[in-house]
Amino acid sequence: MKPSPDERREARRTLATSAYSADMIRSLEQPFLDDGVPLMRVAAGSLASVADVMLTQAGLEPAGARIVLLAGAGNNGGDGLYASADLAGHGADVTVVATGRSLHQGGLDALLRAGGVVTALDPQAAIPGCEIPSGPDQASEELDQALELCRQADLIIDAMTGIGLKGALRGIPAALAAELGMESGLPDRPAWHDPASQDGPLVLAVDTPSGLDVDEGTLPGAYIPADVTVTMGAMKPCLMLPPAAYVCGRIVLVDFGFDTSALVPSVSCMSAEECASLLRAPRVDDTKYSRGVVGLVTGSALYHGAGLLSSKAAARGNVGMIRYCGPEQVGDLILQELPETVLGRGRVESWVLGSGVPTGQAQEAAGPEGQDGQRDLIADILSRQAADMDEDEAAADPPVVVDAGALDLLPDRLGPRTVLTPHAGEMAALLNSHGENVDGDQVMAEPLHWAVRACQLTGATILLKGAITLVVGEDGTDRPRVMTTGFGPAWLSTAGSGDVLSGTIGAMLAQNAGPIQDDATLMVDLTAAAAFLHGLAGSLASGGRQTGWEQPLIFDPRKPQDFADLVAEDNQPEGQGTLTGRIGQPIRAGQVADALPRAIGLVMSRAEGAAEQIDRSIQDGDDASLFFENSSLWF
């Protein structure tokens, strides 16, 4: 039976928000290959179409464009060869640089028939119809010439390695990547990098940029950052996980029609639809208590503002009431802006602890001025969480969000109903307190590894902050569940933003107190949904369209013109404010908290199909929004 439009939309949403390991991808491909489906030719046609669009959007004529293909020996290189043959057949000037000792024979034959030129760099290569370097000296000369060809090109197609690569690039691919891309680390450039205005060639990566660890999402060595990555069949973890996802550019996902229903994704990302399903809609019989009450032990005699910011976010986060516990001067500050706040302990459905509370070391250094009782109260609440664990993990106390100054008060054992929200430096300190030896730079280089390790060591749900935020927690199985959300601008890296995030998470947990009691694995979804709302509020406050991560554009190989039309529409000039509209403007944390109600309203309205005229029609009747997927100029 032919799927309905709703079923097709849901399948594509799943496709765009789920990533699968390299082994899983191979298992998805195999039935198609067994049935004789020419996946390589489908991939190549899609690549050629996207290359045409890239060149056109950059103001270049595809016919006559100078294109260099960096081709490895495997199927990834074969995809690139067939695509380059198509481009050469339509008038492009194509040179293939063979980075290994062989090339896919069918792709090579097609490329040569179309008039492409092939050059080899390895003296031990055996490539029919191609001159091979006679020794190291000639190989060095050929490498220099290949690099110059690349620098003078309009477009580089990176097809050196596929999903089978483990570890860093080596040999010739590593040398090319180090010269054309980065030897290590992230590029030092603004978050709103505009490839259309860059001096060098555009870069189109095949499946994934060369040099990324596909399953771990790390940058283990030299790599070539892409302006656009065309990935085949399904998303790979490195396209969602930091830091690798930051160098993939705009992602285009070619829909092969894979059936992923029997697979559990390695990584999934929070979407507007999923977030909407987790927000509690108001009911006719609601009271302030039934909508959820958030308790906050935040702010301190030393740091007043965090108490206000976390309270503002919680109060604006779709709950019925907040309680604040803390120093009188902080309570008075909160009451000036939130007079409905109740001071003191009482019934709550979630706790937010630690934002703006000094660490033990900082409190000791402050002397009597820092002795405000906040740390003692936090320790008491956390001890109750540990007691719950001792009672066969009974959910006797509300879920807890632990931020900043409370992270050094954690008991030895926690459960998934406790959310820890460290940044990289705090994560390193947390891990070191549990016997690891790691610093903040190492956490940023391998965030997935260390977030999973923190989850294993503490038992808690872990939210590791970043432009792409990671949430790791219990899945009810023997492996942790991993979610990401990168839906927010780089402007969110501002003082107090984390305090707003903690309050937002607390509100999301409080309004879902009942479901959490029944199923603690919901903590991952709810925490990621709160981070999504925080990012959306940041986008609304900044007025920009830059985000840490964007869902891929879906390419239907049966309808390549639909993709070209979509990109052309998405890149229509919007007047003098187009560039400014992409970047937005600086924001303060308080503005993010103020934007939360609008963010929640947009997400909930979107779920009901009435998002105030902000949706635009895209492929197969699916929808998109200025603030949701397909939210920025395509590359």
Image (cartoon, rainbow, N blue to C red):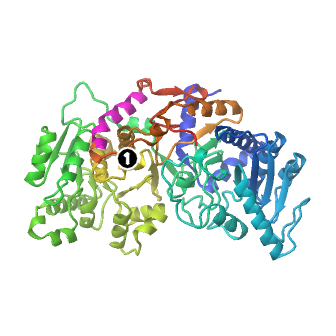
Spot occupied by residue 536 in the image (x, y as percentages of width and height) = 39, 40
Spot occupied by residue 505 in the image (x, y as percentages of width and height) = 31, 47
Q: Is residue 364 visible?
A: yes
Taking the view exactly as shown, the residue that stands out farthest to the right is 129
Q: What kind of element bears circle 1? A: helix
Can you say whether 159 is above or below 121 in the image?
A: above
Q: Nearer the viewer, residue 69 or 142?
A: 142
Identify residue for label 1.
531
Quarter location, residue 470: bottom left
Quarter location, residue 463: bottom left
Spot occupied by residue 609 in the image (x, y as percentages of width and height) = 44, 25
Task: Give yes or no for residue 593 being in the magenta stretch.
Answer: yes
Left or right relative to 342: residue 135: right
Q: Nearer the viewer, residue 374 or 388?
A: 374
Left or right relative to 309: residue 501: right
The boundaries of the magenta stretch are 591-607
Q: Nearer the viewer, residue 310 or 119?
A: 119
Task: Give yes or no for residue 261 being in the magenta stretch.
Answer: no
Q: Nearer the viewer, residue 401 or 76?
A: 76
Q: Residues within 10 Å of mark 1 (few under 14, many from 20)?
A: many
Residue name at image x 69 percent, y 41 percent: 55
Q: Is residue 470 visible?
A: no
Left or right relative to 531: residue 557: right
Left or right relative to 301: residue 356: right
Quarter location, residue 459: bottom left
Quadrant holding the C terminus: top right
Residue name at image x 64 percent, y 53 percent: 200
Residue name at image x 54 percent, y 60 percent: 216
Quadrant holding the N terminus: top right
